[in-house]
Each structure stands twice: as C-alpha cells, then as structure tokens.
Image (spheres, grey):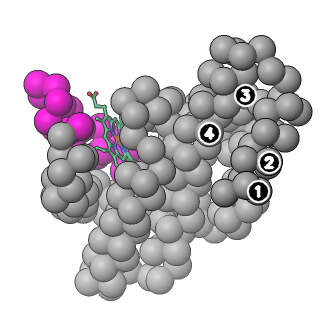
Amino acid sequence: MTLEPHTFMTTMEKRVSFTEADKALLMSHQSWGQEIASEMADHFYAYLGRDAEMDAIMSAKEGRIHRLRETFIQWFHEMFTGMDNWGNGYADRRWRIGLVHVQIGIGPQHVVPAMATVVNEVGKRTKKDGKPEELRDALGRICMIDLAFIEQAYVEVSSAAVLKETGWTEGLFRRLIATGAGSM
Ligand code: HEM
C-alpha cells in the first residue's frame, strides 16, 4: 500500500493534464513567482490564523510561523522551477511535505481549503498583473498535484500504521473499510 512518489507524480501529471506547455510557462514566470511569493505567504498565513484550530498548531512551537513563511516561499518558488523538471526530486520533496503534515496531525479538512486559498489568491494576482489565463491554469494544476501528495500521504500513513499494528492483510483492510462505509 506504500506509495511510490515517482510513479504517483507521473500518474497525477496525466490525471490533471499537467503538460510540457504548462511547465514551460511556469519556468518563464519564475521571477514573477518570486515577486509575488511574499504576498501569497501573507494571504496563506492570514487565512490559517483566522481558524482557531490551525492558529493553535501554528503557534504551538517557538519560531514556527517564521520558519513556515520561509518554507512556504521556497515551496511556492519550486512550483515555478519544477526543481528537476518536475521529476523524481520534485516528487520526493512533495511526498516529504505530505509526511511532515501527517506527523503534525494536519488532515484533509485543513489542507484542502488552505490550498484553495493559494489557488484563489494566485488567480487574482495573475489577472491583476495581466498574465495569461494559461499561467493561472498551470498553477492550478501543479497546486492540485501538490495537494494530492499531501492528502495521499495521510491515507498511506494511516493505512500502513493500521496494517503494521494489526497484522491484517491489505485485502482484509480494504473489505473492512468498504463494509464500514456501507454501514454509515
Ligand atoms: C496548501 C497547503 C500547504 C502547503 C503547500 C504547505 C507547505 C509546507 C511546507 C513546504 C512545509 C515544510 C516541510 C518540511 O519541513 O519539509 C510545511 C510544514 C508545516 N506546515 Fe504546512 N503547508 C500547507 C498546509 C498547512 C496547513 C493547513 C497547516 C495548518 C496549520 C500547516 C502547518 C504546517 C506546520 C505546523 C509545519 C511544520 C513547521 C515546523 O517546522 O515546525 N500547513 N508546510
């Protein structure tokens, strides 16, 4: 059941139709991405700060908010550069980001609307700066791939933990989930 990040990346690229043209467009807007990163970080952390639960997670450790601003800016930049042309290095990094969030206990209910904030704000800024709609769409697609990594990490880690603890087979586990869902 453990996810293989490189295969997952390829699958997601196909699934969301993240194309070579998208990559070229993002690459050519790297410096614009750097210009707007700080403003995007402001929107992102203002959004998290308005939610009591997420605000508590953010303030739980000394220096966390400051560190997070830097990691957000780096993450945002990587969407434009693709690190290694959106290859294995990119996939490994996105998987790692997913695992970090699972460790802290940040679930889909936190991450999905947070990513929606990024997509929304970046869309507004694209329009304001007269950038092509295709750039906004390319960013939307890569954000969805990144989101899928974080969400999938949650499922994979939870499932792997249950299998390890119980010794159940994957087949049994899947049947139990299907039965459980059916009875809700
Ligand atoms: C759009 C969704 C998100 C993205 C792209 C994102 C990005 C990141 C990145 C790049 C890191 C650093 C990972 C590392 O150390 O390797 C990180 C860590 C972290 N994120 Fe997120 N994040 C997202 C959503 C959230 C949400 C909703 C919360 C809720 C409060 C959150 C809280 C944290 C915390 C607490 C850390 C660890 C900070 C530390 O080093 O102490 N993130 N995030």
Asked if the residue at tag 4 contacts the one at tag 1, i.e. Cβ–Cβ closer than 8 Å, the answer is: no
Please give the residue where the numbered disc 4 appears in the rendered image.
Answer: 155
Tell me the tag on residue 76.
none
Which mark's residue is nearer the viewer, 2 or 4? 2
Please give the residue where the numbered disc 2 appears in the rendered image.
Answer: 179
Element type where label 2 sits in the image:
helix
Query: Along the horizontal axis of the image, is 19 left or right of 78?
Result: right
Magenta stretch holds residue 36? no
**In this orientation, which residue lies closer to the viewer: 83 or 98?**
98
Q: Residues within 10 Å of mark 1 (few under 14, many from 20)?
A: few
Q: Judge whether 38 appears above or below 135 on screen.
A: above
* The C terminus, quarter of image: bottom right
Element type where label 4 sits in the image:
helix
Please give the residue where the numbered disc 3 appears in the rendered image.
Answer: 2
For marks 1 and 3, the one nearer the N-term is 3
Element type where label 3 sits in the image:
loop
Element type where label 1 sits in the image:
helix
Residue 35 visible in the snapshot = no
Mark 1 and mark 3: span between their CA atoms?
25 Å
Mark 3 and mark 2: span between their CA atoms?
22 Å
**Where residue 130 sits in the image (x, y, percent)?**
32, 85
Which mark's residue is nearer the viewer, 1 or 4? 1
Query: Along the horizontal axis of the image, is 75 left or right of 46?
Result: right
